[in-house]
Amino acid sequence: MPHRPPLPGRRVACAGIILAAWMAVLPVAAKLVVMHGHAEPTAATLWIQTDVTTTVTVHWRAAGEAVDRTLRLHAAKADDHVVVARLTGLAPGGAVPYRVRAGRDRRDGVARTQPSWTSPGDAPDLTIAIGSCFFAADPDARPSKHDYGGGFEIFRTIAAKEPDLMLWLGDNLYLQPPDLVDASAMASRYRRQRAFPGLQALLTATNHLAIWDDHDYGPNNGNASFRLKDQTLKLFRRYWPNPDFGLPDAPGTFGIARHGDLMFFLLDDRYYRSPNHARDGPAKTMFGARQLDWLKRALAAAPRDSIKVVAGGSQFWKRAGRFEGWHHFATERAAFAEWLVAQRIEGVVFLSGDRHFSELLKIERTDAYPLYEFTSSPLTSRPFVALDEADRANPDVVPGTQVARRQFGLIRITGPGDARRLSLESYDGGGALLWRHEVRAIDLRFPGTRGPRA
């Protein structure tokens, strides 16, 4: 039988099989995004996202070892191609170079661990950056949406301040109305925001913690009725590698993180929230009974001399006003304020975001140290210039601190032991100081307990 050449279709099919087999042995192109999560004295966390299903390999060298450690993680589509790597065996207060590979992509960086000390007199200086309200419009958004977000150089400015930690105070992205009925659209929003070009340097310039507020939880002024809140909780946990989240019997974003002699109590002001304008009473809650019980136990168990930073999305201590805040939950707030005094919980300061302006509130209390609340907002959203009368006339505002500009905050902790000081500072997007107020840690104690501690 004479030889017949293969049909053209067969030739193409065979070539396709060979090409596919050849491509299978090549590493895939995987665009990487890396963020430094919370660090401990002897471990650091890397949050890593690729854009394809692949193996992520992380190399680092533990303290005192001559050979790199290697961690291989599977970036799966079901997890939005997110993996979290924990670098262990590190020295306190040190820097550890690392290399991340995914396919043909590679990222080299340097992670940092927390300092550690045994004597209060050896406490090092710390700098904590804070901010809220990061809006970035979609490329095809209408002009008014593009105008709402801007000043993205603020992220480079924060990175240049070289903070030890960045705490995001909520509205870390803005879910849009079409997203709120589609979990996949919400996931896409998270991916786009995390890959925002202007953000990348900050993601690896410091370690990061976060809480949420209404716009990264769900609808504007959202409460516990939001039907997709379990989906947004899943996304928040995927994109923010905080040390812990909620309790086995109480889901949420709340948890504790420690950095040096600062303890952060990160609150969830949405998952259990009653409607803002529901009738006040014992049943009306911003945080939920289980979360508040956890917070009280955690504060009572914290070292007496530690600085206790309580962070929430909504303002805690403003007196009144039509905008969101704990004042709309007066029964719950009053009970907590009474508990703080009755239990003589010392060293507490409060942080909040949301309002699109900054201010420092100083709440004077009878026979107790004053409560300070530092509100820092917005990072890139439009500032809110038309303050209502309740804000303008609030006698608790420290003069000069109420500023409606795009901004971020710094908390600088300096000095040893009983001489510890907190400098609360606000900066504009270019790094210019807007205001500063200093608080001595010893003045965050009850009268009669301000002498040196043994």
Image: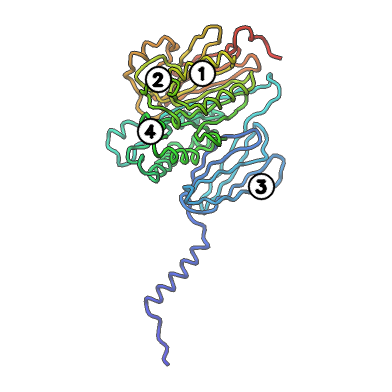
Q: Which kind of residue does numbered mark 3 sit on?
A: Asp
Which picture quadrant has residue 413?
A: top right
For the residue carrying disc 4, how many other residues have a C-alpha within 10 Å: few (<14), some (14-19), or many (20+)?
Answer: many
**Marks 3 and 4, how far apart at CA:** 40 Å
**Marks 2 and 4, how far apart at CA:** 32 Å
**Tag shown at residue 135:** 4
Q: Nearer the viewer, mark 2 or mark 3?
A: 2
Earlier sequence position, callout 1 versus callout 3: 3
Indicate the position of residue 378 as horizontal and vertical percent values. 40, 26
Earlier sequence position, callout 1 versus callout 4: 4
Q: As rendered, which of 374 and 91 lies closer to the eye?
A: 374
Element at label 3: loop
Earlier sequence position, callout 3 versus callout 4: 3
Q: Which kind of residue does numbered mark 2 sit on?
A: Asp
Residue 50 relative to residue 259: left or right: left
Q: As rendered, which of 231 and 124 lies closer to the eye?
A: 231
Which residue position holds label 2?
A: 280
Element at label 2: loop
**Marks 2 and 3, how far apart at CA:** 59 Å
**Tag shown at residue 147:** none
Earlier sequence position, callout 2 versus callout 1: 2
Earlier sequence position, callout 2 versus callout 3: 3
Which residue position holds label 3?
A: 68
| Contact check, label 3 and label 4, Cβ < 8 Å | no
